[in-house]
Image: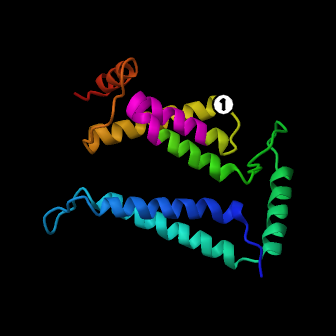
Amino acid sequence: MKRLDVYVVGPYTVALVISCVLYYHALQIAPAAEGQLGADFWPKTILVLAMITCVWEIGRSLLSDPSNRSARQAHDTADAASTTHGDGGPHNVHELTPLTPWIGMGLTAAYGFAFPWIGYPLATWLYVTAFVYFGNYRRPFIAACVGVVASLGFMFLFMRIVYVSLPIGVEPFAQISTLLMHAMGVK
């Protein structure tokens, strides 16, 4: 009997359960008229893809040989540690701990909780910056720049192209959101 690695299977199991619960709630969204995409299409599609991904990763983890996984991880770590830039700094070092998926899930939960209060632009910037940083890209300035670009890019996409209303947050955060909306020409 193979040892079940909770650090590998656990996050996917939690994500699978959450996806199933959210899918159940998405079934309550009224579908559009026949031949049209309704408000229920994208949430259901994304949740089904998330469930498929979780089941795939759980199955892969359960069916893989733990001794091969340990050898592969040791080989990947040795390769990553030996690769350097010209300045001697590490390149593509994957020193992810077993807690990394849990940190990502915690950041995602905090993001979902915070963005109605602090507004979409600020919450997305903080989320993406933290996700990049804790995802093992330990350059705070670059992570913050990626966060700014992602936040403004998605805000532009959703508000100017798709015409989706995003939460602006409560004062004083609403002022930041409103300023960015005016800068992008959103009324």
Magenta stretch: residue 121 in it?
A: yes
Q: How is the image coloured?
A: rainbow
Name which residue lies at 77% across and 78% down.
2
Q: Is mark 1 on a helix, strand or loop?
A: helix
The kind of secondary structure the magenta stretch mainly shows is helix
With respect to residue 49, does 87 lie above or below?
A: above
Image position, residue 118 (x, y; %): 42, 28
Name which residue lies at 61% across and 41% down.
132
**122 relative position to 64: left or right:** left
**170 relative position to 112: left or right:** left
Name which residue lies at 42% across and 31% down.
121
Is there any visible trace of residue 99 in the rendered image? Answer: yes
Residue that sits furthest to the left in the current view: 33
Part of the protein shown in magenta: 112-131
Amino acid marked by disc 1: Pro
With respect to residue 69, does 138 lie above or below?
A: above
With respect to residue 21, does 128 lie above or below?
A: above
**146 relative position to 176: left or right:** right
Name which residue lies at 53% across and 33% down.
126
Magenta stretch: residue 67 in it?
A: no
Q: Quadrant of the N terminus?
A: bottom right
With respect to residue 155, does 105 lie above or below?
A: below
Q: Name the residue under label 1.
A: 140
Is there any visible trace of residue 119 in the rendered image? Answer: no
